[in-house]
Amino acid sequence: MKLRIAATCLTCLACTFAIVAAHAGPCTVDIAQFEDAVRKSANNPYAGVMAPQTVGSQLDQQPTPASMARAQKRARAAFAKTMARAKRLDAAGDRPGCTRALTAAKGMYSLQ
């Protein structure tokens, strides 16, 4: 009896993995690995979303807390939008598109 239950559980588990694999896009594994790395870097003060330095930041003036908050908000929004685009292209089966979007997202996020 226990053998039948174990066999049934293993069969169900195998079917579940087959269904998940069938719905996976060309970049699903890469996206999942990157998201896992982002989650693991959450406690690292040196990790996070980055934005390019603006011309205004190169002038002889210090950024204000409000301008820093706006820049961080824009950077987070751009990162989220790029990740969503990568997932959307992955779901559509567009390997070159999702690879480009994921590469862009990786360029926006420092894992150090």
Image: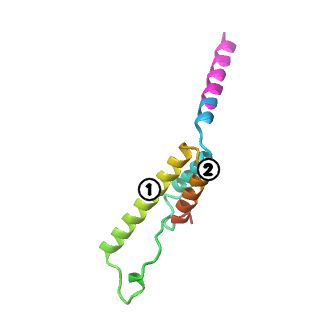
Q: Residue at left 59%, top 34%?
A: 20
Q: Amino acid at mark 1?
A: Lys
Q: Sequence order check: which comes first, mark 1 or mark 2?
A: 1
Residue 4 on the magenta span: yes
Query: Looking at this view, is 4 or 100 the one in front?
Result: 100
Location of residue 26 by image quarter? top right
**Secondary structure state at the residue bearing disc 2:** helix
Q: Which residue is mark 1?
A: 81
Q: Quarter of the image containing the C terminus?
A: bottom right
Q: Residue at left 54%, top 54%?
A: 40
Residue 48 on the magenta span: no
Q: Mark 1 vs mark 2: give the one in front.
A: 2
Q: Is 57 above or below relative to 90?
A: below
Q: Amino acid at mark 2?
A: Arg
Expressed as whole percent of the image width and height from the top left, the position of residue 8 reads 64, 17
Q: Residue furthest left?
A: 66
Expressed as whole percent of the image width and height from the top left, the position of residue 37 reads 57, 55
Q: Is 1 above or below relative to 109?
A: above
Q: Quarter of the image containing the N terminus?
A: top right
Location of residue 18 by image quarter? top right
Q: Which residue is mark 2?
A: 95
**Secondary structure state at the residue bearing disc 1:** helix
